[in-house]
Amino acid sequence: MKDSKLFKNSSFSVLQTIVIAAAALLLFKLMVVHAGLKATGLWSYLSSVNAIAGFGSFGFANALLYHIPKYQVQHDENKLSALINTTFLSVLGFTTVLCLLSYAIFSFVIPLTVEKDLIGEAYKLLPLVVLSFFFSGLSTTYLSVLDGLMLMHVRAKITIAGSVIFFVTGYFLLQKIGIAGIPLAQLIQNIFLLIVAYLWVKRKMLSYRFSLGFSTSIFKNIFRYGFNFQVMSVTQIISDPFMKSMITKYAGSNYTAMFDFCVKLLSVFRSLIIAANQSIVPQITVFNTIGRQNRIITFYKANFRLVLVAGIILFLSPVVMADAISTIFLNHANSDFNFILYNVSLGLLVNAISFPAYFYYMGTGNLKWNVINNIITAVIILIFTPLIGEFLGGKYLVVCWSASAAIGASVVITAIHKQNSFSIRPFFNKNIALLLLAIFCAAVLNHYLNQLTVIKNAPLLLVASNVVSLSLFLLYPVLSNPVFKKIRNRVRIRYAK
């Protein structure tokens, strides 16, 4: 992949992530306003059905990202068409079964986990949620084909359009029919994504024709690669709904809503890093195929430096601005919200630092450590959340969630550095120390500023003072950091041509 195309794909992927996040966060705010925090928490809980329904498409979609570049090198369009059709039919079958299974599971556990006054509403929402994620699984197939064809910028444009449809439709339906309007809007979005992604694949692959032909040999190839992703999906199927059900049981749906919001907010930054990284997977696959291992390691080291610096800024800045964020979305500072935000930030920071290793293994086809990461995370949640909820209370379940994410990610990071015989210590240099010091100083200053009566009683002033103090402290560490200097130089050179 040429550098210009890689830059274009990464840029549009990041833009896509920003638009999706903005739509989701604004809708969250609107849900709280028009439907209330409890109903929003109920939607957050039921939407974890995505972990179950996603099992049908997760592994196959990622297999496309790995196999399409390999088949393109062979210039075999018939085999490529067979790959796409076999994958779609596989996803259709798996997703149908798993959506039915998820409906049955949630129908059983709703009375056991949801507050009595919300049980009726939960049963009304469930069919819409399941149907929405059914079409989500199907659309993922053709969107992943575009990824495999190294057309991430096209996928991004389609996804951005879908997010706009989701936000606009969700906004109007929320006012008309309440919280049920959100899964209905998501259903409309996913049908749109399926149709438009299919048409774009047809446009970019003139020889492609959809058929019900199923290739057993191709299925074995994609299943062999995708099986590891399916194992990771199983851990998500178990851990995500289980975590939210435990929080709902021991801390209530209000706490679930705040937890879900913090995860969604910080997952914006997580998704930005993923978007910037995922576009290099086909290139790693090509390098691995032709035996250029040294080039892959160079990719990894540069990527790790960038993700480390970006992760510290993106995931620790919300900790500094916790009161401001709480004021924006809950209309007041909330200690429980801040506690959740601190824990989610730290867990996702370590998790994000492992992404360069995650995509390294994904591009080379060796997914063992990625699977181990997910298994460790799920096992910790399954064992410790019931114990913590019973003996310490629901508030501390987020500590378990954060620790599980950090421990699982640490295993992947350690594995790649040992496998390739280079130390992680040189990455944590004086520039990283300066960045951490700046964030710490901003946190101390904001803590004292937020206690002042004139700031505490003026939400806009609170937000503005927090943003300004953080920006001032970060200015020098960011401008002087070698990683950002290199990025600025490359952008300057690119646009100077």
Image: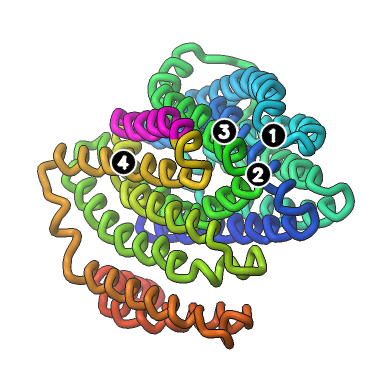
The quarter of the displayed image where residue 382 is located? top left
Q: Residue at x 53, y 42 (%)?
A: 394
Q: Earlier in the sequence, mark 2 or mark 4?
A: 2
Q: Position of residue 42 (x, y in %)?
A: 70, 41
**Mostly what secondary structure, the magenta segment?**
helix
- Distance from Cα at disc 1 to Cα at disc 2: 8 Å
Amino acid found under the numbered disc labelled 4: Ile
Q: Residues within 10 Å of mark 1 (few under 14, many from 20)?
A: some
Left or right? Give the position of 112 relative to 231. right
- Distance from Cα at disc 1 to Cα at disc 4: 30 Å
Q: Position of residue 36 (x, y in %)?
A: 75, 53
Amino acid found under the numbered disc labelled 1: Val
Q: Earlier in the sequence, mark 3 or mark 2?
A: 3
Q: Which mark is residue 253?
A: 2
Residue that carries the numbered disc 3 in the rendered image: 241
Q: Nearer the viewer, mark 3 or mark 2?
A: 2
Asked whether residue 383 is drawn in magenta, I would say yes
Numbered label tally: 4
Magenta range: 366-387
Amino acid found under the numbered disc labelled 2: Ser
